[in-house]
Amino acid sequence: KQEVTQIPAALSVPEGENLVLNCSFTDSAIYNLQWFRQDPGKGLTSLLLIQSSQREQTSGRLNASLDKSSGRSTLYIAASQPGDSATYLCAGAGSWGKLQFGAGTQVVVTP
Amino acid sequence: NAGVTQTPKFQVLKTGQSMTLQCAQDMNHEYMSWYRQDPGMGLRLIHYSVGAGITDQGEVPNGYNVSRSTTEDFPLRLLSAAPSQTSVYFCASSSSQGAGELFFGEGSRLTVL
């Protein structure tokens, strides 16, 4: 069974600093990995989807990398803003197609 | 474009009552799923469907039933509510299981007294 871990559980940074969020997974035969954002009391919004054949995906200030050999994905958010404050979750899809979610990293960006 | 719509947003039940959480998507997605989110436990898959007429169990299926009579709708039924089912429930859909971007509804917060 795929297990997904996100460390740290919480992170606080000053505005303007770059954010680095980590996601580890146990099954290197990963189908894809997705990063999501969740605001309090809301559903999850997909940020980036990296297929197993890709090494990274970029969208605006967001960049996510995937290293299957080391079982790691990293989400970079450049020049953080207070509006980036949220919980960020990663989820890996194994060969059986089901997503396994990490517990998330709660991010606070202080003005 | 509505995406994934869940109703109700909030519900309070007494132990032993039954209810149905509704989920509808307008993206013609084949794959639909139900998750529950509990503090410290992340999201756990309850049931999923890869198309109309096809459903399967996820990680925590006990106490829940699903059916998929149309591509658009995927209701989740609680047969006899228990306090352990107090949680936030999310419906999600994708063009294909595990391969496409997953779209979530806003969630349904259920409290069982």
Image (cartoon, coloured by chain):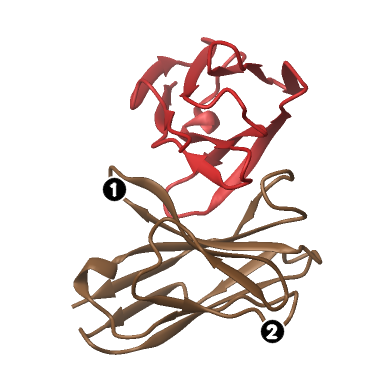
Chain colours: A red, B brown
Labels 2, 1: one chain: yes
Splitting the image into 4 quarters, where does residue A83 fall?
top right
Q: Nearer the viewer, residue B27 or B68?
A: B68
CA separation in Å, label 2 and label 1: 32 Å
Question: What percent of the width, then of the height, locates residue A103?
Answer: 39, 37
Question: Which residue is disc 2 drawn over?
Answer: B69
Q: Residue furthest bottom?
A: B17
Q: Is residue B82 above or below residue B19?
A: above
Q: Which mark is residue B39?
A: 1
Q: Earlier in the sequence, mark 2 or mark 1?
A: 1
Q: Residue A3 location, x and y as percent? A: 43, 33
Disc 2, SS: loop
Residue A68 or A75: which is nearer the viewer?
Answer: A68
Quadrant housing the C terminus of chain B: bottom left
Amino acid type of disc 1?
Pro
Q: Residue at x 54, y 11 (%)?
A: A70
Which of the two marks, 2 or 1, is nearer to us in this view? 2
